[in-house]
Image: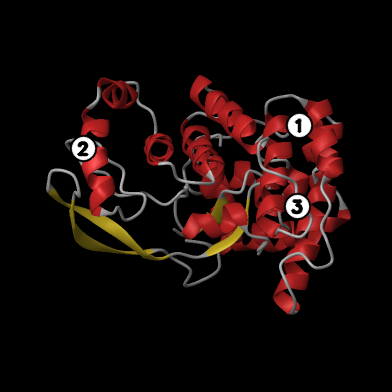
């Protein structure tokens, strides 16, 4: 699954207020970057129902939010196949033994209640993975929080999923030599920040150590360690100013931050709803020297774009 790389790895390279994510994507886009899809027929492992879906073939990414969700040429998280009738989310391949166990599970009143309540596909995947005894369940909760925040960032479901992720991520043992454990601790600190638990968020953030050996040897490993160290340091700013926003402007890449500054102009250009006004901190950040040249370039691109 494409998004799994972003949520867990150190590689730093769709709608939060719903028009905003595509605006950031547009700001980071380059010519010929696009997602491609193909129609595929899928057979539900439980019940044998056949259905067609548009399956992702390729997608471009050029950044990620502090919660790990990628920014790119398509909507994230990438859609998972889901059986139309019984609602089984095919988040991975299942063994024959697992299929036999899943039949009564998805037919249960509990699973039906989750579907009726409108729980997201990845939250259903989390509950299914939990039932099957899968490991690393916190990652499914994190991705479920992306789905909920994309729909309504201030909504009850987004906050509930985020809180469930935080509780699950607390159980991940710190390991300075393991990038996946480092990622989990960072996402935990960020989740606490989004929930307004700033003291604990800072305590977790400050406790994260990146070993010189984390991720192994070679150039890519060194770049990953450097990227994680930078993100961990950068998270201190939003925590200190008690910002709960999903998109702190000072944690975006330069191109995405420039797009954030120009979001009102971009929204008008692409006939999207006008986003909320910039905060005082965001206005000051946008006026700083770090973004001036990129803002100038992106504004020129906006004027030339048909």
Disc 2: CA contacts within 10 A as few (<14), some (14-19) or many (>=20): some
Which residue appears at 58% of the width and 30% of the height? 162
Q: Nearer the viewer, mark 2 or mark 1?
A: 2
Determine whether, in the image, residue 50 is placed left or right of residue 230: left
Q: Which residue is mark 3?
A: 175
Let me know if residue 154 appears in the view.
no
Q: Earlier in the sequence, mark 2 or mark 1?
A: 2
Residue 253 spot, x, y in % from top left:
71, 57
Q: Earlier in the sequence, mark 2 or mark 3?
A: 2
Which part of the image, by quadrant, shows the N terminus? bottom left
Residue 296 spot, x, y in % from top left:
73, 60
Q: Quadrant of residue 279?
A: top right
Vertical side of 1 occupied by 84: above or below: above
Disc 3: CA contacts within 10 A as few (<14), some (14-19) or many (>=20): some
Q: Nearer the viewer, residue 87 or 76?
A: 87
Q: Which residue is mark 2?
A: 103
Q: What secondary structure is found at the residue carrying circle 3?
A: loop
Q: Nearer the viewer, residue 116 or 276?
A: 116
Kindly identify which numbered label has been placed on residue 250. Answer: none
Which residue appears at 80% of the width and 68% of the height? 213
Residue 254 spot, x, y in % from top left:
73, 58
Determine whether, in the image, residue 303 is placed left or right of residue 295: left
Let me know if residue 16 appears in the view.
yes
Give the Cα separation between the discs numbered 2 and 3.
Answer: 38 Å
Give the Cα separation between the discs numbered 1 and 3.
Answer: 37 Å
Q: Which residue is mark 1?
A: 279
Q: Quadrant of residue 126?
A: top left
Give the Cα separation between the discs numbered 2 and 1.
Answer: 50 Å
Q: What secondary structure is found at the residue carrying circle 1?
A: loop
Q: Nearer the viewer, mark 1 or mark 3?
A: 3
């Amino acid at each position: 699954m494409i998004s799994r790389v972003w949520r867990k790895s150190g590689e730093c390279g769709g709608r939060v207020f719903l028009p905003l994510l595509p605006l950031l994507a547009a700001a980071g886009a380059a010519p010929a970057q696009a997602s491609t899809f193909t129609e595929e027929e899928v057979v539900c492992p439980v019940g044998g129902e056949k259905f067609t879906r548009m399956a992702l073939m390729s997608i471009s990414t050029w950044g990620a939010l502090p919660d790990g969700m990628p920014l790119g040429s398509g909507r994230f998280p990438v859609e998972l196949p889901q059986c139309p009738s019984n609602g089984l989310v095919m988040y991975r391949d299942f063994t024959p033994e697992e299929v036999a166990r899943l039949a009564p599970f998805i037919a249960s009143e509990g699973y039906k209640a989750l579907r009726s309540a409108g729980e997201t596909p990845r939250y259903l995947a989390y509950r299914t993975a939990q039932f099957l005894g899968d490991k690393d369940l916190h990652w499914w909760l994190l991705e479920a929080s992306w789905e909920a925040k994309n729909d309504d960032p201030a909504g009850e479901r987004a906050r509930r999923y985020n809180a469930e992720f935080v509780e699950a991520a607390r159980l991940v043992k710190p390991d300075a030599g393991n990038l996946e454990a480092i990622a989990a601790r960072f996402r935990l600190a960020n989740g606490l920040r989004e929930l307004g638990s700033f003291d604990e968020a800072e305590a977790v953030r400050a406790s994260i150590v990146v070993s010189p050996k984390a991720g192994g040897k070679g150039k890519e490993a060194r770049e990953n360690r450097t990227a994680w160290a930078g993100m961990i340091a950068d998270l201190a700013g939003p925590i200190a100013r008690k910002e709960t926003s999903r998109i702190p402007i000072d944690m975006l890449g330069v191109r995405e931050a420039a797009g954030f500054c120009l979001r009102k102009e971009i929204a008008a250009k692409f006939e999207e709803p006008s986003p909320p006004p910039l905060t005082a901190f965001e206005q000051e950040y946008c006026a700083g020297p770090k973004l001036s040249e990129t803002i100038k370039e992106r504004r020129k691109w906006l004027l030339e774009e048909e």
